[in-house]
Amino acid sequence: MRAKAAFVVGAGVGYVLGTRAGRPQYERIVRASRAVWSHPLVHKPISGLESRAAELAREQSAAMIDHLAEAAKNLLRQDAASTSRSTARTVEVPADGQRLA
């Protein structure tokens, strides 16, 4: 919750400062951020993180598929059990409105 509040406050302050500074200041900020983003010292760690994330995804994909399959089976078993219990408690009422014993 604090992170959301901090983001909203930061966005609000950025908006107010940006509108006061005007379009030229905005363009300067955009150019500076693009220069920082395209700098090799920034891209090298990011590309390393991307490759590490892809490697972890490959390593864990089989285990994750097995885990998800087991969770789905458990949900289906629970649903089948609850359905059979609810139908066992169902009382049939004949068309003439009298209960069956």
Image (spheres, rainbow, N blue to C red):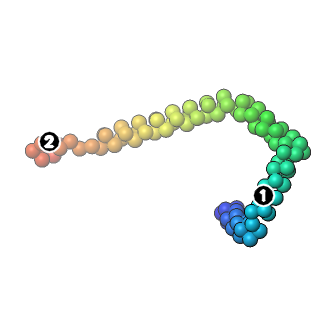
Q: Is residue 75 left or right of residue 2?
A: left
Q: Is residue 55 visible?
A: yes
Residue drawn where x is 17% and y is 44% of the image: 93
Q: Is residue 6 visible?
A: no
Residue drawn where x is 71% and y is 68% of the image: 19
Tag shown at residue 94? 2
Tag shown at residue 8? none
In this rendered view, identify the residue nearer to me: 6 or 56. 6
Report x, y in % for residue 1: 66, 63
Q: Is residue 33 left or right of residue 78?
A: right
Report x, y in % for residue 53: 76, 37
Residue drawn where x is 66% and y is 28% of the image: 62
Amino acid type, residue under disc 1 in the picture: Glu
Residue 28 vertical placement versus 38 (above, below): below
Q: Quadrant of residue 61?
A: top right
In this rendered view, identify the residue nearer to me: 13 or 54. 13
In this rendered view, identify the residue nearer to me: 89 or 45. 45
Disc 1 marks which residue? 27
Outermost residue, left direction? 96
